[in-house]
Amino acid sequence: MAELWHEFLRLFTELDVALAEIIARHGVWTYAILFAIVFAETGLVVTPFLPGDSLLFAAGALAAQGGLSVPLMMVLLFVAAVLGDALNYHIGKAIGPPAFSGRYRFLKRSHLEKTQRFFEKHGGKAIIYARFVPIVRTFAPFVAGVGTMSYGRFLAFNVIGAVLWVVGFVGAGALFGNIPIVRNNFSKVILLIIVVSVLPIAWEAFGAWRAARRERLRAAGKAEG
């Protein structure tokens, strides 16, 4: 168990090294491993912590070095992303908000509320935008299922978002991941991708905090008056 946990942590701390070892050890089965990770990260509301953007970028970079096909990887991970979101939508439709009552430790209501605010701001296009925002990416299809969005409309946004996300990041990894300056600073580039991807969440959180602070000050002013 300790060894498995160590290997899991390496997906965040030494992603390029860990993936290179997986490719060397498992060969074409790497496609299945990456498929499973992307499917779980997008399709299971209990696994929003799995790597997404950084994984796709690193996978594209390593595939471009040879041994794996970049086009095939794009197709398979696109399918994984679409199927994951579809499953998540139907889970949301089946179990709804009661799942976030606090009974399940991994289903945090704060994550659901952040995603709901994201939907309120962007509407149906949130399904596309959410592909590029960790945590929100996992909960957006669930919230769509809980709400009133029809599956046909959701599916259209799901497919468009998956194409942009997978082709964008895998393609960027294949094109830029092996440039010397990027390859020599790969861990820093991965960290930068993670930081940039969470900026929307940080900005939304800051906006919510600022709004709550204004409301408190307004309430305090009325109380004094």
Image (cartoon, helix red, strand yellow):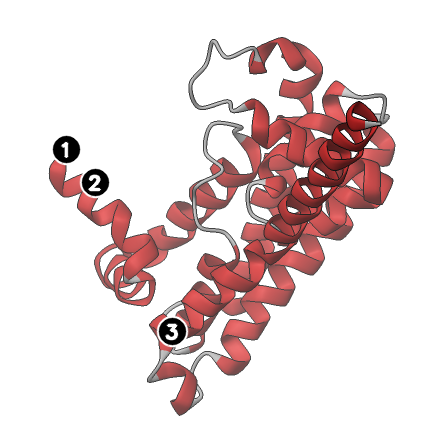
Residue ID for mark 2: 5
Q: Tell me what residue is drawn at x 50 percent, y 62 percent.
A: 195
Residue type at tag 2: Trp
Viewer-side residue, 184 vs 82: 184
Check the image and name the residue furthest to the bottom: 180
Vertical arrangement, residue 131 with respect to residue 105, above or below: below
Vertical arrangement, residue 156 with respect to residue 185, above or below: above
Mark 1, Cα crowd under 10 Å, few <14 / some 14-19 / many 20+, is few
Separation (CA) of disc 1 from disc 3: 28 Å
Residue type at tag 1: Met
Closer to the camera: disc 3 or disc 2? 3
Residue ID for mark 3: 188
x, y percent for residue 61: 44, 73
Q: Tell me what residue is drawn at x 46 percent, y 14 percent.
A: 104
**Residue 148 falls in which quadrant of the image?**
top right
Q: Is residue 82 left or right of residue 147?
A: left
Closer to the camera: disc 1 or disc 3? 3
Verify CB contact (< 8 Å) between mark 3 and mark 2: no
Separation (CA) of disc 3 from disc 2: 22 Å
Q: Is residue 93 left or right of residue 188?
A: right
Q: Quick one: label 3 or label 2, which is nearer the N terminus?
A: 2
**Callout 3: helix, strand or loop?**
helix
Residue ID for mark 1: 1
Separation (CA) of disc 2 from disc 1: 6 Å
Residue type at tag 3: Lys
Q: Quick one: label 1 or label 3, which is nearer the N terminus?
A: 1
Q: Quadrant of the C terminus?
A: top right
Q: Tell me what residue is drawn at x 47 percent, y 27 percent.
A: 46
